[in-house]
Image: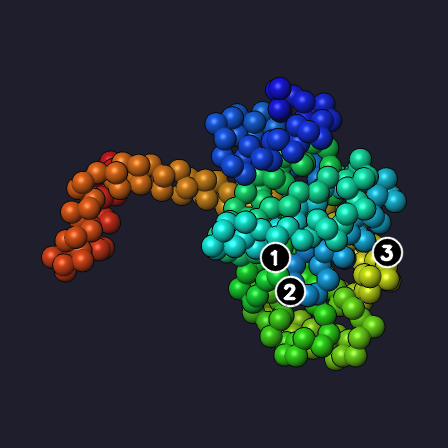
Amino acid sequence: MDIAKELLAGSRLALARAITAVENEYDNAVAIMQELYPHTGRAHVIGITGPPGAGKSTLTDKLAKEYRRQGKTVGIIAVDPTSPFSGGAILGDRIRMNDLTLDEGVFIRSMGTRGSLGGLSRKTAEAVKIMDASGKDIIFIETVGVGQSEVDIIKAADTTIVVLVPGLGDDIQAIKAGILEIGDVFAINKADRDGADKLNIEISMMLDLNPIQVAWRPPIKRTVASQNEGVTELTQTIEDHIAYLKESGELTNRRTKRTKNELIAMVDEQIGRYVMQKVTTTGEFDRLVESVHNRDKDPYSVVNSILATVLR
């Protein structure tokens, strides 16, 4: 089948096959993306991130249903950690959204991190473009349970929601540094637990300490996703942020910066592959490794020499 043509015609099978082709780097992957790219840029991408156990999957499920009630089509990319031993992933997020799989207006794709750090799969950006080209209005990216430095979601999402939950112990640890800075909206999930007020105050205090003054101060919303409480209000906050991004021009700025980063990453990957193919397959490289190991040469001079030879 002509995957790109069938996808643009609305085929869910083609959509699944296109993501599989890109994720596994099949021979036709680049051709598919080249044909689909002119049809991208219309969907709004929402990132859902936060520590493990915060209820990200349940909240994503409820938000998706809320957007479906508004008549919008939804794509969901649920990223799960990949085993460093078997290479497999549990893909448990899809289980929590099982009833959504029966909705023709929703497409869910689970992706393993495959060793990628930052809370996302290496092919997440391509999967977003494919869902975008297929006509999805809203695309959710749910990251793996992230720590303080895993902030790659900001490179893929237009609106980033940081989901936190009271009672995790050192609550402030979950939101300091990078995680604090990437949040456009903070959601205190499982807000019926003790400690919700304390966590709310801590987040607000951290936001007050942010030296960068911006027009959009991230709102703090409370939800109990399992009971569908606060989800409608959170959805409205997301819509308010979308309106702000468009009116202020920030949406264009973010997407331009994202495009620049994607191009740099693609160039870096292609150069890396080219160098590896040209260098590591030769006996000369093994000799260079040995010379560095024996301290006959330093690694910095060797790398500069390799680059000067290969990229001249």
Depth order, front residue of 32/113: 113
Q: Residues within 10 Å of mark 3 (few under 14, many from 20)?
A: some
Q: In x, y percent, where is residue 30? A: 51, 29
Depth order, front residue of 68/107: 107
Q: In x, y percent, where is residue 118? A: 53, 57
User: Callout 1: helix, strand or loop?
Assistant: loop
Q: Which mark is residue 232?
A: 3
Q: Which mark is residue 52?
A: 2
Q: In x, y percent, where is residue 174? A: 62, 71
Relative horizontal placement of residue 39, taking residue 244 as reference (left or right): left
Question: How many labels were placed on the picture?
Answer: 3
* Location of residue 185 (image quadrant): bottom right
Relative horizontal placement of residue 185, taking residue 18 as reference (left or right): right
Relative horizontal placement of residue 34, taking residue 233 as reference (left or right): left
Mark 2 or mark 3: name the one nearer the start of the chain. 2
Q: Residues within 10 Å of mark 1 (few under 14, many from 20)?
A: many
- Comparing marks 1 and 3, which lies closer to the viewer? 1
Mark 1 or mark 3: name the one nearer the start of the chain. 1
Q: In x, y percent, where is residue 55? A: 73, 62
- Circles 1 and 3, Cβ within 8 Å, touching? The answer is no
Q: Residue at x 67, y 71 (%)?
A: 207
Q: Which mark is residue 144?
A: 1
Mark 2 or mark 1: name the one nearer the start of the chain. 2
- Circles 2 and 1, Cβ within 8 Å, touching? The answer is yes
Q: Amino acid at mark 1?
A: Val
Q: Amino acid at mark 3?
A: Thr
